[in-house]
Image (tube, rainbow, N blue to C red):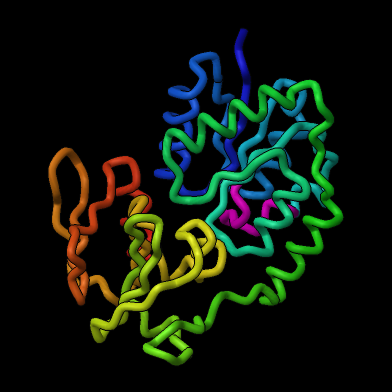
Amino acid sequence: MKLPVAIIEDEPATARNLARLLLEAEPDIEVLAVLTGVHEAVNWLKINMEQCSLLLMDIHLSDGLSFEIFETIPVDKPVIFVTAYDEYALKAFRAGGIDYLLKPFEAADVTAAIQKFKRLVNTPAIADYNHLLKIARDLKAGASVYRQSFLVHYRNKLIPLNVQEIAWFYTVNEVVYANTSGGASYIIELTLEQLQQELNPHNFFRANRQFIISRECIKEVEYYFNGRLFVVTHPLPAEKVIVSKARAPEFKQWMNR
C-alpha cells in the first residue's frame, strides 16, 4: 500500500536527498510533490492535502516560515520537521510535530522518523500550532539567541570561551572538545547534537558524526574518494574532516551562502 508524502523544502539538494532516503527507509513511499515556498505549499495543499498521509517540512522556505502555512489553511496531516535551527524551534517541534530531522541527517535518522510515524499513524498528530506560531514570530523578530560563549575548565579555573574563537568541535570516546583557531583545546560538556541546537547554522556545519566545523576555519575543500569531500581547516585536526557524498551538496550550498 502506497504511503503518499509531500516534501516542503526550498533547497533542491536537500529535497532530493530526503526523497532518496525516504524511499530507502520505506519503499512504499510515494513523493507526490516537492514544494519550495509557503505560497506554493498553501496552493498545493488546498487541492491535494487529502491525498497525503504525511508532510515533511523545513522551517525557513524561499518566501517565509513554514509556520505561515498553518496561519492560512488548516493542516490535518502529521508533520515531520526538517530543520537546522536552534533550540527554541526544536523544543516547539518536540511539543507539536510528530518528529524532526536535524540537518544534516542520515539514513538512520529518516528511517527512525518514518517508523515513529507508523507507530503514531492512528494517533491524532496535529501540532500545537499556536505554540509553533509564537516561535515563528520570535524567529521573525530575531528573538532566537544562538550560543555566544562557553564556560570551560582551564587548569584550576573556569574561563569564558567565545564561540567566534572556535574552529571546530570534535567528539572522541563520547567526549566533546572545542578547538580554537589558536590551537587550544577545551572539553565541552554538551553533545554534538546539543551543540547543533545552540550554534548559529550560518556559521557552523555538522560535517559528520565527529565534527562540527566553523565557516571561518575552512581554508579549502578537496575532492575525495567516492564523491566525498575533504575539508582542509586551520588548525588541522588529528583526523581528516570528511563530508559524505550524501551531504556534499548541502555542504556546498552552505559554503555558497
> Which residue is nearer to you in this view: 9 or 110?
110
Q: Residue furthest top?
A: 1
Q: State which quarter of the image contains the N terminus.
A: top right
Q: Residue at x 31, y 81 (%)?
A: 180
Start-end of magenta stretch = 58-67
Does 169 sit left or right of 217 as displayed? right
Query: Relative to 234, is 7 above or below?
Result: above
Residue 197, given in percent of the width and then of the height, sits at: 56, 62
User: How many numbered tags mark residues here?
Assistant: 0
Of residue 109 and residue 143, the one placed in the foreground of this image is: 109
For residue 134, above or below residue 107: below
Residue 204 visible in rendering: yes
- Looking at this rendering, what residue extends furthest in the front direction? 156
Residue 118, quarter of the rendered image: top right
Q: Position of residue 103 (x, y in %)?
A: 48, 51
Left or right: residue 231 versus residue 6 is left
Which part of the image, by quadrant, shows the C terminus? Answer: bottom left
- On screen, residue 44 versus residue 172, left or right, reads right
Q: Left of 140 or right of it: where is 183? A: left
Q: Residue at x 55, y 19 (%)?
A: 29
Residue 117 position, x and y percent, is 67, 28
| Residue at x 60%, y 57% (from the top left corner) | 60
Q: 189 or 73: which is nearer to us?
A: 189
At horizontal 44% and vertical 50% (from top left) the residue drawn is: 104
Q: Is residue 66 magenta?
A: yes
Viewer-proximal residue, 237 or 44? 237
Say whether residue 64 is magenta.
yes
Location of residue 113 with respect to 36 vertically, above or below: above
Q: Is residue 256 visible?
A: no
